[in-house]
Image (cartoon, helix red, strand yellow):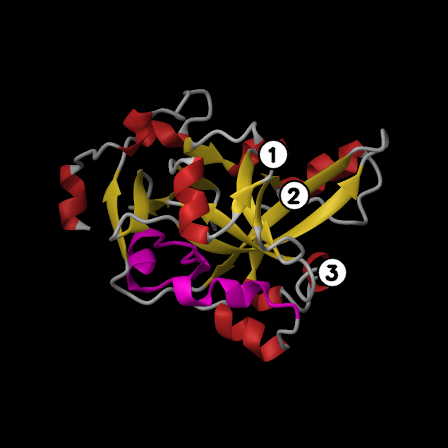
């Protein structure tokens, strides 16, 4: 699972880090302290078809077989994530995995630890505090008004040691590509086995995490603000 991310890095930082440039039409991009996938925010991506450009696609993939806006809205809520184990099995993913892969740019994400009732959200980020890329799939869908909507899903996999401790019930984590393998994900001639080899847990020791405010799990609270990334101390976590 990965439903909450942060992209606090500026456009210039992302362009320098990923050796790509925002398209002129992407002037609407704004950094997020907390982007909730269920609100279908626009996040920066780099696609196989345009590897030199950073584009803004909506989170929540609309599959090609969606017939109506109602279909699209319903389907995309179940497509925020794509399980790596089903990329070549599920109809939604197998039509995209060979030709519609993308990098989803971010600098952190949020997951909650479950202690048998109370949930304790954590902010997870690279120890060097640098932006990184999730492995993603994307799609383009034309609505009834003839407008194209570009959307994506983040690929998830089994957890590493840190994420197994934090996301301790469903035990999943997003696929975070090591910097030296990010561009491999965009190669057009990857074999099935090579794709599987890229959708593995990130090596232990690269990520760090700390607990944050429980308000991040309350949809009615505006949490796209800097305070959401501040450390919150929960004494009971010392016993977890």
Q: Note whether residue 239 is visible.
A: yes
Disc 2 to disc 3, how far (Cα)? 17 Å
225 or 231, nearer to the observer: 225
Magenta span: 159-188
Q: Tag 3's secondary structure? A: helix
In the image, residue 160 lies at what x, y percent?
34, 64
Q: How many dots with numbers?
A: 3
Residue 186 lies in the magenta stretch: yes
Residue 189 lies in the magenta stretch: no
The residue carrying mark 2 is 151
The residue under the point 71% across, 64% down is 94
Q: Which mark is residue 24?
A: 1
Could you classify mark 3 by the number of other residues whose Cα lies within 10 Å: few (under 14), some (14-19), or many (20 or more)? few
Are circles 1 and 2 on residues that touch, CB within 8 Å?
A: no
The residue carrying mark 3 is 91
Q: Earlier in the sequence, mark 3 or mark 1?
A: 1
Q: Earlier in the sequence, mark 2 or mark 3?
A: 3
The residue under the point 38% across, 38% down is 9
Q: Tag 1's secondary structure? A: helix
The residue under the point 24% across, 32% down is 230
Residue 38 against residue 78 in the figure, above or below: above
In the image, residue 84 lies at what x, y percent?
55, 64
């Amino acid at each position: 699972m990965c439903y909450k991310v942060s992209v606090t890095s500026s456009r210039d930082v992302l362009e320098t880090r990923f050796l790509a440039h925002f398209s002129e039409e992407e002037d609407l991009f704004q950094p997020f302290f907390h982007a909730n996938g269920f609100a279908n925010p626009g996040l920066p991506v780099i696609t196989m078809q345009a590897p030199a450009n950073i584009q803004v696609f909506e989170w929540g993939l609309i599959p090609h077989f969606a017939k109506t806006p109602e279909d699209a809205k319903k389907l995309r809520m179940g497509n925020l994530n794509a399980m790596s184990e089903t990329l070549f099995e599920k109809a939604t993913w197998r039509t995209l995995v060979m030709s519609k892969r993308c990098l989803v740019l971010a600098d952190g994400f949020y997951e909650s630890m479950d202690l048998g009732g109370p949930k304790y959200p954590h902010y997870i980020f690279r120890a060097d505090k640098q932006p990184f890329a999730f492995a993603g799939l994307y799609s383009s869908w034309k609505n009834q008004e003839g407008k194209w909507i570009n959307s994506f899903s983040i690929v998830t996999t089994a957890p590493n040691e840190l994420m197994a401790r934090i996301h301790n019930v469903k035990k999943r984590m997003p696929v975070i590509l090591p910097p030296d393998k990010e561009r491999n994900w965009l190669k057009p001639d990857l074999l099935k086995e090579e794709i599987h080899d890229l959708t593995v847990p990130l090596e232990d020791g690269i990520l760090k995490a700390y607990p944050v405010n429980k308000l991040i799990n309350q949809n009615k609270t505006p949490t796209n603000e800097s305070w959401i990334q501040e450390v919150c101390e929960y004494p009971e976590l010392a016993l977890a």
